[in-house]
Image (cartoon, rainbow, N blue to C red):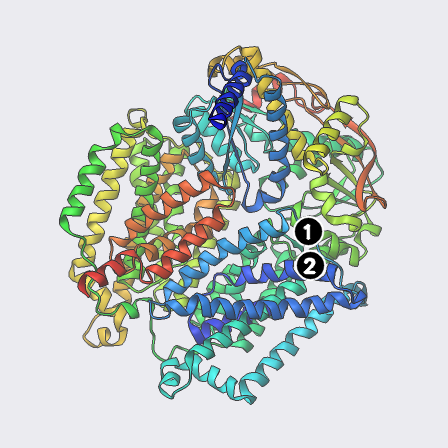
Amino acid sequence: MVLFLIASGLSLIFGVTRIVNFAHGSFYMLAAYLAYTLAAMLPFGSASFYVAVALAAVALGALGGAVEMALLRRVYRAPELYQLLLTFALVLVVSDLVKLIWGSENKTGPAAPGLAGAVRIVGQLVPTYDLALIALGPAVAAALWWLFYRTRWGVLIRAATQDREMVALLGVDQARLFTGVFALGCALAGLAGALQIPRQALTTVMDAAIITEAFVVVVVGGMGSVPGALLAAVVIGVIDAFGVLVLPRATLVLTFVVMAVVLVVRPWGLLGRPEAQARSAGAAVAGARGVGVPRVVIAALIVLLVAAPPLLPTFYVWVLVEILAFALFAASLHLLMGTGGMVSFGHAASFGLGAYGAALLVRWAKAPMPVAFLAAPLTAALAAIVIGFFCVRLSSIYFAMLTLAFAQIAYAIVHQWYDVTGGDNGLLGIWPAPWLASPVRYYYVALLACGAGLAMLAAIGRAPFGLILRAARDHARRAEAVGVDVRAHQWVAFVVAGFFGGLAGGIFVFLKGSVFPESLAVPVSVEPLVMVLLGGIHSLAGAPLGAALYKVLDTVVTRYTEYWQLVLGTILVVIVLAFPRGILGVLGTRERG
Amino acid sequence: MIPRCFSALLVILAFGIAIPSAAQAPIRIGEISSFSGIGAPFTGPYRQGIEMAVEEVNAKGGVLGRRIEVLFRDDKGQPAEAVKHAQELVAGEKVSLIAGTFLSNVGLAVSDWAKQNKTLFVASEPLTEALTWSKGHDHVFRVRPNTYEQGRMLAEKAGRMKYARWATIGPNYEYGKRAWETFRDRLKELKPDVQVVGEHWPTLGKLEAGPFVTAILNQNPDALYVSLFGSDWIAFVREAKKRGLFDKMFVVGILLGEPEYIDPLGLEAPEGMLVTGYPWYDIASPAHKEFVARFQKKYDKNPVLGSLVGYVTYLSIFEGIRKAGSTDTDKLVAALRGLKVDTPIGPISYRASDGQSTMGAWVGTTKLDGKRGVGIMVSHEYVPGEKVLPSDDEVKKLRSGS
């Protein structure tokens, strides 16, 4: 039921404000630590714990409101995804703040006074605290129902969930509504976090552990639907509990399989409604034909990239190769989310499967490195044909979550198939051929692959195919009306993006010499997303720019401080506030303006 | 003019003091570990152990007359990130060797990079056997007793007990699986009537403990082998206690006597478990008592196993450099083969056949210590690595398999 609390908050926030709040798990974590400290400090004896829970929820509500007013409100005019970038920065900041304030050692919270025991129900001992939580779930759901259906504020929220522009036209103060909803959502996350401390350990990674699961519940239930979240939390909870017994080895992936099945059958979740008007990520980009980077700059850059490396210290060459790999990776994602308006949360699948495709050929077929290298994009493209077939039938956040589900399924397969993939111990010894072993030589291979990839992606973006994708992004129905097969085009785009994502994975695997399931994990899907947004979603050139900027920042910051997340997160917040449409986006506007 | 004279004097003084050790450039060592992410709760005290070792050796004039300088890098729990740091440390910072890593897969990634680039890698914390056996090579050494050793230590004891019906729960990755397999295999050798009634593999770091506890109770084993750790272990203990699991079966826990895992539980720590761990509070040797006292004085807190491992790792590196008489990689590699090191827990050596150290672990039973408010290990025994490690011939077979 804790999952329901956190998911309902997340769902509410998305429903009204369209913010994909990555920081929801961070608020949950913050509340848990806060309640832990308060419960020990407060002087109310055995009531201290309960007071602490309430205070933590209130405090998080206040914090959520403050964050909305101070940060998110500044970027509402930017494409919707920039709020996502901001919440990602908050994840980093909160993570280090918790470490700074409470230390990184695991902590055990207090037991809930009066509810520490267990009662016997049909022969099984069930903890009373769990029973209390089970009762609390429907109670909170009922309270939310009352709020939505019996108060004016609730009516406005429901209206805004369906069509917020219409609500704005009717003269409702959107800013206050959004602040209120965000605060309420965060308070629910806070309540969830505080209630968790008698059951689980407090750790600095509890944010990451809950956030994907919360998104799964939200999407399975239907975005913006509180009853849906309740239903989904029960379904996922039951499946988790019984899956343990039936398929003990599938624990890694069960929830994602469930999500994939639900989304394939019901593209808007169990109780969700089709969006009144499918506004996708690209909608706000409508009309933007992309920011041109002057040819002189590109030419100078190419000369520099070709001429400089032999003169650079070896380490910089290695960093450059990594940047090249991520530049191509981000650019391939840009084809989907920038040109196509299809935001993927699972692009790591192409990167990781590409890397594994090459590595498996080296490991099992003793394939020569060039052959294995070429296998990387092909493997990823093949996978994208299958994944894309299912995913392009969905739109917006459901599309994103289905790609995530497939990436997680791929992750689980790679992680568990010890005989073939080496499981979590990965595949080692995937090095370039001896004649390419010197860093500079491998750099030129990477440069060639990345350069060719970027050139082709740029050509695809400008070709009629790219224009049709853009048309479908900006208005799918009108595109269909003029005879475009939207799904077919999106499917092809998905495969192309997979191909180049896989090529990036190929560059990466021979740089590192080994590959692990981590290359398919969520952070690898989030990184290119951040890069594309950072550089500017309007333009393909934004992707490599964002990749370079992010990688350089990351490399420099981690070198000088233990608290790299705090520093990096703060820098990202500043960048987003200063360049609310990405760096190229804002530069482009200024140029034209 | 007086201030200027004074500062000049200070400069001269500073140089005067520094000359013996600064005559040559410092010896640089690259340390990569998971200071953020899933390893974060355990790597802080480990780093403190390292810093203490470095401070002490530098106070005595360094090694080979050169100061020791350690460059710390955070791998964020990601193998690829660790490889990036290895590249930077070796190519950019010109370190003489790479040390550290916490997670097994990160250790393997760095080890493979070291093999390819002919760099010395002294792995401190990762536990996977593959590091020194199936994926072993000339340039890798490892300090801590691996999964196989610790599983065997527990089996030697458990195999002599009455329990026949066994179940296990552990994280769903190589460590959990191997921790169980090595234990189970030895257990069955010692006690052929052992029967396995249940195996449970929850996802690492995401244990929803209730259903697992219920499932284990329904299988009704005599004994349970646990390889959970960290937050999963805490969540499991809480749900298991509410449902009376610890009263119904004997529990064996690999690593769970380490202060890292038992301290956060406070007085909720289960009693009567058979565990491997580190009873720093109860080790009689004067050298170890001094180690604890110095650590407490410096950091105003107690050492945990990670602190000891960090300290011993760097003692070993210093000793290796002394024996090699240089920081040349080939000479260092040769010196580390068969190297003997005096540590706070007695002498250990690095086996020539696989580079595994003979550092052991303590096996004992858990009990609550009301005074400190935490669980401790009692009636414990130090099992040196030699006792459980496979012979050189077996190692040769293991290494040729790769």
Q: Is residue B185 visible?
A: no
At a point 38% along the width and 42% down the height, the residue shown is A355
Question: Which three-letter amino acid code belongs to the residue tagged 2?
Answer: Tyr
* Circle nearer the viewer, 2 or 1: 2
| Badge 2 vs badge 1, beta-carbon distance below 8 Å | yes
Q: Identify the residue at the far left of this view.
A: A296
Q: Position of residue A483 (x, y in %)?
A: 19, 73
At a point 85% along the width and 46% down the height, the residue shown is B370
Q: Position of residue B129 (x, y in %)?
A: 59, 30
Vertical position of residue A58 compared to residue B70: above or below:
below
Vertical position of residue A314 compared to residue A265: above or below:
above
Q: Which residue does the numbered mark 2 point to in the structure image?
A: A36
Q: Residues within 10 Å of mark 1 (few under 14, many from 20)?
A: many
Vertical position of residue A454 compared to residue A21: above or below:
above
Dot 2 falls on a residue whose secondary structure is: helix
Dot 1 falls on a residue whose secondary structure is: strand
Q: Which residue does the numbered mark 1 point to in the structure image?
A: A107
Chain for disc number 2: A
Q: Is residue A173 left or right of residue A154?
A: left
At a point 80% along the width and 47% down the height, the residue shown is B270
Q: Is residue A208 left or right of residue A305?
A: right
Q: Residues within 10 Å of mark 2 (few under 14, many from 20)?
A: many
User: What is the quadrant of the C terminus of chain A in the image?
Assistant: bottom left
Quadrant housing residue A113: bottom right
User: What is the quadrant of the N terminus of chain A in the image?
Assistant: bottom right
Between residue A274 and residue A68, name the one nearer to us: A68
Q: Is residue B47 visible?
A: yes
Instruction: Give the mark count.
Output: 2
Marked residue nearer the N-terminal end (2 or 1): 2
Between residue A420 and residue A80, name the one nearer to us: A80
The CA distance from mark 2 to mark 1 is 9 Å
Question: Which three-letter amino acid code belongs to the residue tagged 1?
Answer: Lys
